[in-house]
Amino acid sequence: MDTEWRSVFGRSDRVDTARCRNLGNGRFERVRYSQTADLDIPIVFINVGNPIGIGLVKSFPHPGGNVTGFSDAIADLSGKFLDIARELGGPQAPIDYLWYTAWEDGQNRFSLTERAAKAAEMTLRSRPLNNIDDLEPQLAAMKSDGATIVIIQPGPFTHRYRKRIFQGAISAGYATIYGFPPVVQDGALIAYGPDAFEMYHAAGQYSARIVKGEKPADLPVQQPTHFKLIINLATAKTLGIKLPETLLARVDEVIE
């Protein structure tokens, strides 16, 4: 079986070029159900946060059309990110939240985090990005406000510019929390999120089933069942941060 890996990086104008010989896998943002239903090629998506909300599938049990795949469930981890931030800075420390406003699921994820912060009686400061040129001004504004901990909203935009974001945060002295563990080595301090390798393996199994004749519409959209906590000790050393023992006791992997 031949497989081509494609990513549209959140741009719906790339959907037509993201066709694959058998299956298309990628981080879709604005791929609507009405668009994908017209394609002849089955699609298995990976790491999509809100596939129903963005119109990619009709439901998790019965996706419909020729699309199925694996949701990242990261929006449901808002409280977990705040818990980690509280362990790092204490219950009274304000938490800054860096996010991309033009992403359809961005507002949803921010709202869930804001709601979780209010419930936990934590101060959450929104740091929106309209484009990547807003990064340096936002980092400077955080500095003026005495920021120490930043949750970086995971998504196609922040993933694309992650190295610039991580390095900017390190230069400013901020501890960063991110939701996509495989890229923590790029400079994030802590990453907590789904086991991506498990999802990619499962996507391969779905692909094989489709090649053998099953239809994507009959394969339920799956959510991750295993999550990983990874800490970058090199970043911690650069920032001069002593990590709490409670956090180190739960870590799944350490980047030296």
Image (spheres, rainbow, N blue to C red):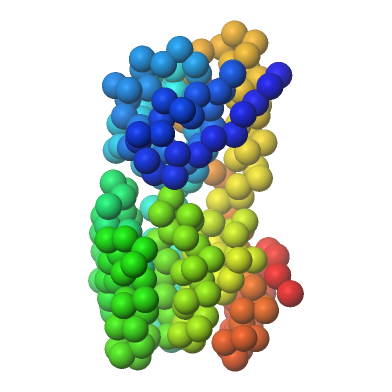
Q: Is residue 209 left or right of residue 179?
A: right
Q: Position of residue 25 (x, y in %)?
A: 54, 32
User: 99 and 196: which one is in front?
Assistant: 99
Q: Where's the C terminus, which quadrant?
A: bottom right
Estimate the x, y position of residue 198 in percent, counting from the top left. Answer: 65, 42
Q: Residue furthest top?
A: 213
Q: Position of residue 57 (x, y in %)?
A: 36, 27
Q: Is residue 216 above or below residue 121?
A: above
189 or 79: nearer the viewer: 189
Residue at 55%, 70% in the rendered image: 188
Quadrant containing the N terminus in the rendered view:
top right
Residue at coordinates 56% horizontally, 12% vertically from top-left? 214
- In which quadrant of the rendered view does residue 110 lie? bottom left
Q: Is residue 87 visible?
A: no
**From the viewer's perspective, is residue 146 above or below residue 255?**
below
Percent position (x, y) of residue 232?
64, 73
Residue at 63% in and 14% down? 211
How many marks can you see? 0
10 or 53: nearer the viewer: 10
Quick check: can you spot residue 26? yes
Residue 199, compared with residue 178, is above or below; it is above
